[in-house]
Every structure is written in C-alpha cells, then in structure tokens.
C-alpha cells in the first residue's frame, strides 16, 4: 500500500501517478501520497499493457499495485464502469481471508468508478454467490477451489475477461492448487492480460509463467526496498520449558495493540491460547479446525479491539491483514525461510514499524541461524525480557497513562476530596498503583540459558566424571519432593493458608497456578508464599494483609475456570499416605532370602531406583525409555523357580502362562 500521512480532511488530488481520476480521488481521500516500489514498477511505461511476473514481499502494497495496473484494461478510458454484467477481471487468492481482504481493498479503490466487486470463497454459501454472479459483477475475487466449482457449473461467465491476477501464487502452489490454477487459466480467454504476483519465484512459478504468460515483464522488488524494510528481527534465547513464559513476557514488554503468535500444530495453538487466557490476555485462535463463522468472529474481535492476541498456525494465518499489528512471535520455529518471511510479513505493513521475534531453545539454535541466513536476515540475539524490566516499564507507562491527560470533572473532584479526607495521599497513590497492576497479566521469571553456556565442570561444581563431589562441598539445598513447598519461600509476615481443588493428577503446575491465584484474588505475586502441590489438591500461603479481601474475591463466580478455592481453618495439612501413593501396593519384584528361597517384595518396601537423572528433568519420554529397558531385563532373567513351601501351606500359584486345573467331582 501507499505510505500514510497524518489523517486530514483536506482534499488534495494525487497528480504524480498515471492513474484514472476516480482512483486518484480514492487514494487522496485515504491520504496516500507516496507509492511503494512495487506500485511504481507496475505503473512504469515498460510494463504498460504487458503480462507481469512480480516478486514482492507480503505487505509491500501488491493489492493496490495490481488494482492500479489493470485499471486501464478495465475502464478503457472511461471514468466509470457501465452496468455490471459478465466480469472483466478475475483475482485468485490462496485463502478466504486474503480473498476477502482483496475484495475490500479493490472496493474502496474503485468506489468512485462505480465498480461492483464480488467474492467467491470456500466456507461461504455458494447459492448466495450464484445470485450475486447472476446479478453481474465487474471484478470477481475468489479462492481457487470455489472459482473452479462455479466455472464447472457454468455460474461464472469468463467470456468478457480482460485481466486475471494470481495473488500469492507461491502460496497456492504450496497448498496444492496448481491444477485449479491451470484450469482457470485454460478456461479464460487467450486475449486476457495475466498478472502473477508472488513473494518468491520458485521453479514451479517460473514454469507456470512461461506456459500461460506472453512476453511477461518481470519485476523483482528486494526485501530491503519492499514491505520487510520496516521489520526488526530478534532471536531470543530461552530454555526449552520456558516458551510460554517467554511469550507472556514479550507480549507484556511490547504492549502491541495487536500481536500474532505462530505455532506449528493445532494442539499447540489450543494449548497456548488456553495458557494466555489463564494469564489474563484477551486472545483468540486461528487454526484449521475452526469453521468459517468462528474464524470471521475471531478476526472481527481483533479488528474491533476486543482481542489483542491471535495464536495461529501458518495455513490459518495466510492472507490475514490486521490493523496495528506491530508484533509477530514465532513460538515454534518455522519450517523454512519462506514461511518465516510470510509470517513476519503480517507486520511492518504500509509504513508501520514491526517486530518479529523468534524463540530459540538451545537445541534449535543452529536451525534458527540457518533460517536467518537463508532469508538474508540480520537478527539481534538476546535474552527474553525479565520480570524486573517489565515492572519498570509498567511504572513508566502508568505515569504516561491517558487517564492523567483527561479533563477532570466536578464529580472526580468531589470523590478526590472525599478520599483525601479519609486517606493519606500516599495510601491513595499506592491503591491506584495496585489497581493499575491488577489489570495487567503478571510477568514471568525466566532464566537465560546463555548464562550457563560454556562453563567448565569446575565452574559448575562437577568433577571430570560429571558427578558432584561428596562432603561439605555438596549443595545443602534439599531436592523438592511431592507434596512439599515450591521454590517460593515462606512469608516473613503473618499468613493464611488456602486450598485449591486441583493437583498433580490434573497437571497442576506452579507456573500457571501462580497467575491464576493472582487473578482470582486480585493480588500480586509478592502476596503469595509457599505453594504445595499434591495429588488432588494444592495448598498455598497468602499474606495476612490481603487474606480477607482474597477470601471474598475467590468466592465470586469465575468465567475462566471453575476451580474451587477455600480457606484452611487449621493451616497446611500433611499429605496423607493415599496422596503420596496414587496406586495400591503391588507385588512385582522377587528377592532371594538367606536360604536361596525367592519371595516377592511390595513396591513400598523396596528402595527407590537410582537413575542417571532426576525423573523430572527428562519428561515423559525419559520415563518411557526406562520402561523399555526394564522390559528387556525382564525378558533376559532366568526362568521362575518355585520356592519350597512348608507342610500344610496352601498350594503355590501356577507359573505365569499356565492355567490352574480345577478339581471337578465325578
């Protein structure tokens, strides 16, 4: 698009573009005064009337570019269209969102030429589209599958077509629409003008252009000159388990009016959306499992400000154009450099500055460096914003809040005087600060994995064999055990204990329990002491100073979760034996006594197995691996030998795999 000036109602026509007066008027009313490089290129004298093969990044103003380029073919010197009949131009886009966006762009660009622009996209009612096509259209915008369906059914008349535009052709190839594109190009008149726009020009696009274009004029706009010149790339080092925390802190640090977070799978989108909702963000999701109506509602929520964050997959986010989108976060690294550029191209559009952030765990660092090198991108490497940095920013933002600039009314003054009569100015200011923080999601504490990189064994307190030395040098801090307090220490001041009806069986973790408790009770993290997560419940400590108001607030119904929280009358409870062990004792290990007899020992009598790592460090995969080794050892052990039994004892159970014979009476 053109670069925007400050909004003004003064009308000054654009005179430097060789375009028609109706289009110039529409551009002037939107205060577009400077064409982007791709728009200048397609309007050059050398490109006039010719087929075009254009390579330009997403967000470089391609829609307005081909809208201006085909104006001469469609209007043929006239200032307005005649009555709509068979369409004169056909625009093909890879996704519904992009097609609907193109329809809106061309509708305002051609509004003073009395153009009728119709959309035909999947997920919409085809009968309504059939009626609109029958009523006539000057420009038809659609997705490949739906356009082919209308063509095969004879609903779309292409006999009068003067121009065909393939927008984001490389995306259509990636999505498997090559046959549909070829069918459309074969069906349309040979006299048409063909404009092919693509972010990249792979071999498939070049071959398509050679087959269906005639002496095409090739335009290549470099990334630095196109839409990505205004995107700042950052690569953030994170620990593998801190992806969600890093997303939270980035959203809080940048405070973008709209932000887009990319994941590689639907499950990841679903999980991250739930996490951000729990943290207190207004967030929607876009993935392939949504219906068209749900997608439309999600995008509308972003456009009207009801939602600020969108978590999406690559395919679901293709073609969407969100206003004020200043931040793109790659929660999962993209599969290739082109996908990364398509993702990032959602921001930095039409002259606005944008930031694209890649979250890079240590194991994916080489992959991230390769993607950046292939894309020719120079990214700034660093750590994720810390909680202290975000709190400092919050203080600065509070001092600049728009509330202080608003005009003070008489009611405000009356309330202010009443407050000053009852409270000191310092108490009122402190309460205001608490109210300001309460509406913000709490930042997370994140460790920079780069801080521990490259340290020697001696620096880490380990010897050559990788083990921690015994004796006084060994760390005295005990390991955390089930049912014990989290790393959060006890409170120096008085405290009250509460219990939440959720535990380890429902995947309770301190990292999401903490913000949930803050949100439910309207308190800060500093007001929470120890947290003890057990099998079915979680007990936590609240400062006595805020305990009374906390108890009142947790009793109110909550829209986001139905976790019951209640005060403990007699303080924290010791975890019962049934809490410590969620399974009955099982007899599964055979031991040998002094006489060589073998007997079985229950799990609870055995000493715990010693693994190379604590169980929690390697996750479920580690547990599965241990189970596999155990099975192999079980297969290799010698056959079972029945122990001798004293006289009068009951018969032993038969060996594994054999059925006991029943004594049947004659």
Image (cartoon, rainbow, N blue to C red):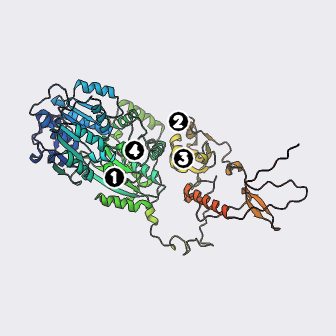
Find numbered disc 4 in the image and state the secondary structure of the residue it sits on: strand
In front of the other: 532 or 410: 532
- On screen, 41 above or below 123? below
In front of the other: 359 or 8: 359
Q: What is the x, y in percent for residue 73?
A: 13, 36
Q: What is the x, y in percent for residue 398?
A: 38, 45
Which residue has dot 3 on it? Answer: 513
* Contact between labelled residues 2 and 3, with CB atoms less than 8 Å apart: no
Q: Is residue 44 left or right of residue 544?
A: left
- On screen, 114 above or below 259? above
Find numbered disc 2 in the image and state the secondary structure of the residue it sits on: loop
Which residue has dot 1 on it? Answer: 340
Q: CA distance from mark 2 to mark 1?
A: 38 Å
Which residue has dot 4 on it? Answer: 312
Q: CA distance from mark 1 to mark 3?
A: 33 Å
Q: Which mark is residue 558?
A: 2
Q: What is the x, y in percent for residue 320?
A: 32, 41
Dot 2 crowding, Cα within 10 Å, few <14, some 14–19, many 20+: few
């Amino acid at each position: 698009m053109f670069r925007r000036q400050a909004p003004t109602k003064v009308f000054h026509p654009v005179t430097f573009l060789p375009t028609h007066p109706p289009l110039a008027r529409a551009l002037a009313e939107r205060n577009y005064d400077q064409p982007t490089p791709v728009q200048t290129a397609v309007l050059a004298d050398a490109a006039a009337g010719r087929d075009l093969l254009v390579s330009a990044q997403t967000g470089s103003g391609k829609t307005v570019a081909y809208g201006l380029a085909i104006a001469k073919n469609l209007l043929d010197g006239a200032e307005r269209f005649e009555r709509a009949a068979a369409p004169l131009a056909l625009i093909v886009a890879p996704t519904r969102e992009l097609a609907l966006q193109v329809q809106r762009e061309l509708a305002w660009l051609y509004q003073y030429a009395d153009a009728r622009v119709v959309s035909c996209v999947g997920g919409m009612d085809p009968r309504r589209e059939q009626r609109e096509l029958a009523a006539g259209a000057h420009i038809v915008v659609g997705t490949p599958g739906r356009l082919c369906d209308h063509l095969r059914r004879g609903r779309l008349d292409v006999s009068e077509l003067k121009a065909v535009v393939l927008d984001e052709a490389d995306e259509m190839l990636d999505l498997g629409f090559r046959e549909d594109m070829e069918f459309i190009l074969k069906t349309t008149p040979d006299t048409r003008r063909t404009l092919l726009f693509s972010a990249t020009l792979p071999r498939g696009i070049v071959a398509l252009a050679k087959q269906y274009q005639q002496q095409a004029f090739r335009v290549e706009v470099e990334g630095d000159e196109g839409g990505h010149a205004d995107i700042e790339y950052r690569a953030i080092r994170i620990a593998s388990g801190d992806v969600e925390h890093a997303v939270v802190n980035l959203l809080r640090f940048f405070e973008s009016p709209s932000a887009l977070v990319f994941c590689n799978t639907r499950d990841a989108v679903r999980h991250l959306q739930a996490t951000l909702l729990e943290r207190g963000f207004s967030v929607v999701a876009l993935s392939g499992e949504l219906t068209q109506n749900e997608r439309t509602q999600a995008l509308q929520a972003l456009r009207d400000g009801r939602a600020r964050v969108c978590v999406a997959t690559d395919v679901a986010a293709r073609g969407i154009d969100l206003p004020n989108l200043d931040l793109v976060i790659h929660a999962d690294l993209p599969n290739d450099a082109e996908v990364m550029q398509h993702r990032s191209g959602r921001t930095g559009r039409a002259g606005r500055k944008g930031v694209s952030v890649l979250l890079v765990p240590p194991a994916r660092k080489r992959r991230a460096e390769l993607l950046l090198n292939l894309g020719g991108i120079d990214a700034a490497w660093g750590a994720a914003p810390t909680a202290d940095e975000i709190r400092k920013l919050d203080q600065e933002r509070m001092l600049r809040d728009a509330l202080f600039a608003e005009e003070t009314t008489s009611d405000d003054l009356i309330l202010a005087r009443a407050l000053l009569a009852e409270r000191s100015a310092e108490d009122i200011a402190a309460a205001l600060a608490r109210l300001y923080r309460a509406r913000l999601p709490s930042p997370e504490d994140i460790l920079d994995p780069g801080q521990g990189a490259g340290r020697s064994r001696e620096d880490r307190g380990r010897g050559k064999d990788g083990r921690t030395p015994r004796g006084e040098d060994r760390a005295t801090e005990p390991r955390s055990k089930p049912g014990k307090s989290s790393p959060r220490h006890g409170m120096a001041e008085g405290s009250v204990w509460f219990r939440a009806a959720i535990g380890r069986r429902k995947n309770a973790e301190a990292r999401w329990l903490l913000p949930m408790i803050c949100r439910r009770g309207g308190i800060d993290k500093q007001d929470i002491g120890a947290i003890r997560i057990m099998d079915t419940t979680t007990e936590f400590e609240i400062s006595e100073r805020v305990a009374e108001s906390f108890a009142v607030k947790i009793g109110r119904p909550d829209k986001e979760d139905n976790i019951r929280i209640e005060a403990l009358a007699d303080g924290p409870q010791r975890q019962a034996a049934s809490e410590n062990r969620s399974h009955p004792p099982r007899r599964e290990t055979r031991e040998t006594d002094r006489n060589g007899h073998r007997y079985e020992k229950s799990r609870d009598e055995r000493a715990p197995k010693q693994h190379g790592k604590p169980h929690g460090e390697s996750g479920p995969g580690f547990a599965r691996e241990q189970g596999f080794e155990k099975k192999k050892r079980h297969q290799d052990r010698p056959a079972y030998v029945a122990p001798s039994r004293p006289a009068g004892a009951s018969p032993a159970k038969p060996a594994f795999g054999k059925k006991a014979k029943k004594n049947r009476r004659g």
